[in-house]
Image (tube, coloured by chain):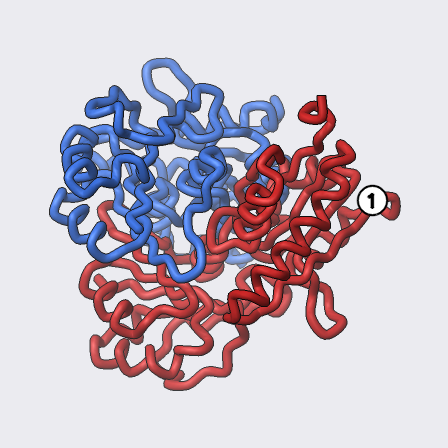
Chain colours: A red, B blue
Amino acid sequence: MTQQLLGTLWGVGVGPGDPELITVKAARLLAQSPVVAFPAGRGGHPGIAQKIIADRLRPEQIQLPLYFPYVQATADLAAAWVTAAETVWQPLMQGQDVVFATEGDASFYSTFTYLSQTLQRLHPEVRVETVAGVCSPLAAAAVLGHPLTILQQRLMVLPALYAIADLEAALDQADVVVLMKVASVYAEVWPILERRHLLDHSAVVVRASQETERVYPTLTEHPTLELPYFSVLIIHCR
Amino acid sequence: MTQQLLGTLWGVGVGPGDPELITVKAARLLAQSPVVAFPAGRGGHPGIAQKIIADRLRPEQIQLPLYFPYVQATADLAAAWVTAAETVWQPLMQGQDVVFATEGDASFYSTFTYLSQTLQRLHPEVRVETVAGVCSPLAAAAVLGHPLTILQQRLMVLPALYAIADLEAALDQADVVVLMKVASVYAEVWPILERRHLLDHSAVVVRASQETERVYPTLTEHPTLELPYFSVLIIHCR
């Protein structure tokens, strides 16, 4: 009986930033759901997903900003995930659906994973559905007007905190390499690209498709760059 | 003067199959464009992109099915691309916009690349814009209810005609490996996954999000599989 009364947690990718790059399905679920959750912003600013969906929210919908600290400390993070999971569990156990809006795609380096996995551990009876969205490397490629991959090209994606050794191996092995959240390692990456004569085949896109988007179509002139967190570097090795 | 009269070619990813997984931007462009092009189907059947957008097309819009043969022979392919490019050039040179609808994303192993590159070679003055869409590996991960990548995981994507040596290297190097269009090599891939004890961490999704979707959440029981062209294999190596 309780099973039938539970709401469903929908993890919905809302795309890279342009509110029009949300899917029709995400827009419908956002319009229908009594409760909408999203990662809380910082310092009084709305979060990225929250900005993307702002114009779709209605006053009668319950909004749940969830706090996910940007920290490495696993205990703090785990505690935040438990709090977030219990927050969305309240409406779910009362039979209300919850849409969790997450920037980009919901399965690709997404906050949604931690929320859903924590919730499933605490409340295994919960129902979870995932709705795919446009991820930032695809948006960056579209902005550059250059295909990400064609034909037999092998693609390697390295996330934020990769080791530089991983980059060398990826450049040896793949035809196209994407570095997510490249800001913190850009100064180390540039000399490697220079040595391999790849600066002309490398581009950085900052906040692809967002209003504050910036594009560096080649990196030859940019040994250093002040980059925000959401910056993607695309290298066409061959 | 001619410059201002040209239409724009829009390469629009219409997502993996579910017509609701199209972006709001793609839906708007499809609704507005006087001319809509797409890869022609085979054997009297509509193509995938054509099926995805079927309910959005209006009788007064000009529809241009473009023929792209599934052949390796470069000369035949190149001739087909030239014909396709000249077909969309006719309305463009008369100042009409053309939306080219392509399944998945428009920059990710997409037919759109060949169309736009051929057109830009023949008519360098053409204006081209790309609109990102949801690609099939993200749709497959959503269907499986398992994240594609988290934390520091390195992702490798290998396209259709990869060599088996590439797969071994990818499994050594990446944490998550995606094999696109795996049908033709599945029988060779399975023993490698078995030897590496990865069958339980591997899944196949056929036509993710389409009506005829099929899911194999583990591969232990499936040393052989009859798979159609659009089948994705996801391996979580670690």
List x then y, in percent, for residue B12.
Answer: 49, 43
Q: B5 left or right of B146? A: right
> Tag count in the figure?
1
Q: Residue at x 72, y 64 (%)?
A: A46
Q: Give the quadrant of residue A157.
A: bottom left
Q: Residue at x 30, y 23 (%)?
A: B228
Q: Nearer the viewer, residue A211 or B59?
A: A211
List x then y, in percent, for residue A35.
Answer: 77, 43
Which chain letter goes with mark 1? A
Q: Nearer the viewer, residue B66 or A157?
A: A157
List x then y, in percent, for residue A153.
Answer: 25, 51
Helix, strand or loop status at disc 1: loop
Q: Nearer the viewer, residue B59 or B175?
A: B175
Q: Residue at x 26, y 35 (%)?
A: B199
Which residue in the structure is indicated by mark 1?
A61
**Residue B53, above or below A71:** above
Q: Give the quadrant of residue B232.
A: top left
Q: Amino acid at mark 1?
A: Gln
Q: Nearer the viewer, residue B171 or B104?
A: B171
How packed mark 1 is, by other alpha carbons closer than 10 Å (few <14, some 14-19, many 20 or more), is: some
Q: A226 left or right of A50? A: left
Q: Residue at x 59, y 50 (%)?
A: A115
The N terminus of chain B lies in quadrant? bottom right
